[in-house]
Image (cartoon, grey):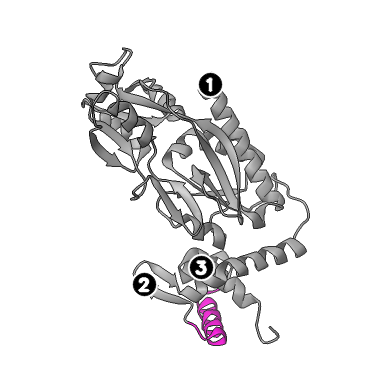
Amino acid sequence: MSNLDLNLLRVFDAILRERNVLRASDAINLSPSAVSHALSRLRAFLDDDLFVRTATGMEPTARALEMAPLIRDALVIIERAIGPKQFDPASTHRQFCIAATDYVTAVILPRFLRATSLAAPNAGIALLPASRIDLTTQIDVGRVEIALGSFSNVPPRIQEKVLFEERDMMVIASDHPLAGREIGLKDFASLPLLVVSTGVSEDGFLSERGLTRRTEMFDRTALEAAFESIGKRPDFKIVQPHFLAIPSLLAGTQMAAIVPAPLARLFTQSRTVYAAELPWEPTTRALQMIWHERHTEDRGHAWLRAMLLDAAVAAAATKAA
């Protein structure tokens, strides 16, 4: 350790998060040449390439991925030791990164952003799509501070908080022949289905480094059991990853979609879809926020979690009204 310049670890951490030397240099206020030189020194010190340049950016080696969470933990501890003891939202220029699906972005984040723009006008918020990244790695290395979604098998190093419980509803185009009616199981079973899946998996869940997240955004088990009770099988006409595309995809078709109830009610505000209860008793599932345990005592992070929880509570209250 006596031969290691700790600033090299800041450079390593920045490149790991940004996967790009130029962006890393901007993040830590160094020139690109200084970042490249620091990386060369660290490579020599550790006798490992650490990052390999590819068409999509600087990809970490196995050694770099192994080191990353420990280095991030160490930097957080140092920052906490020498940084300010208080967090003032009104004066902070801190940048926060949140990963969420387009559903959560539409239902919760408008309230959250309105509140934070008043309480912390100089804070920055970056949103990443939760379905298109290796979420566990991004949380481990500190690029994502909070992820919002439905998770199970959460590893001990990751903390969680339930925001609210949600259930499924059906939506069809507002000019569909069944719009405005109570739709029974036989009618529903005759319709081609549009569903949302954010990843390829056999059971509707994807596991990454100990964290399991839901990829099928509907309860396939309950749906198939209901259809089987009348001798039918569901016709999954379209499987696609975007919640907010559903109204335009339903337009002019006979299809029905299954979506979380808060989103179904949001869609009805545009009058382009008709929302109805499913013709079976849907199960509920938790919508959660998760974060790495290293952030739990961070006052700024605690403020961020509280603001997200307040926005979710408001969304749930609107849903129940």
Q: Which of marks 2 and 1 is in front?
A: 1
Circle 1 — which element?
A: helix
Span highlighted in magenta in the image: 31-48
Residue at numbered disc 3 = 16
Three-letter residue code for mark 2: Thr
Please identify the dominant SS of the magenta region: helix
Percent coordinates x, y for residue 271 in the rendering: 35, 20
Residue at numbered disc 2 = 54
Is 302 situated left or right of 162 in this image?
right
- For marks 2 and 1, give the CA distance: 49 Å
Q: Residue at 66%, 77% (x, y): give it.
A: 6
Is 29 situated left or right of 78 in this image?
left
Residue 162 location, quadrant? top right
Circle 3 — which element?
A: helix
Q: Which of marks 1 and 3 is in front?
A: 1
Q: In this view, does 13 lie above or below 182?
A: below
Residue at numbered disc 1 = 320
Q: Are marks 3 and 2 in contact (CB under 8 Å)?
A: no
Mark 3 surroundings: few (<14), some (14-19) or many (≥20) residues within 10 A: many
Q: Is residue 97 above or below residue 242?
A: below
Percent coordinates x, y for residue 168 in the rendering: 42, 29
Foreground residue among 6 and 125? 6
Residue at the extreme top of the image, as rendered:
181
Three-letter residue code for mark 1: Ala
Percent coordinates x, y for residue 282 in the rendering: 42, 27
Mark 1 surroundings: few (<14), some (14-19) or many (≥20) residues within 10 A: few
Circle 2 — which element?
A: strand
Q: Residue 302 carries which label?
A: none
Foreground residue among 61 and 167? 167
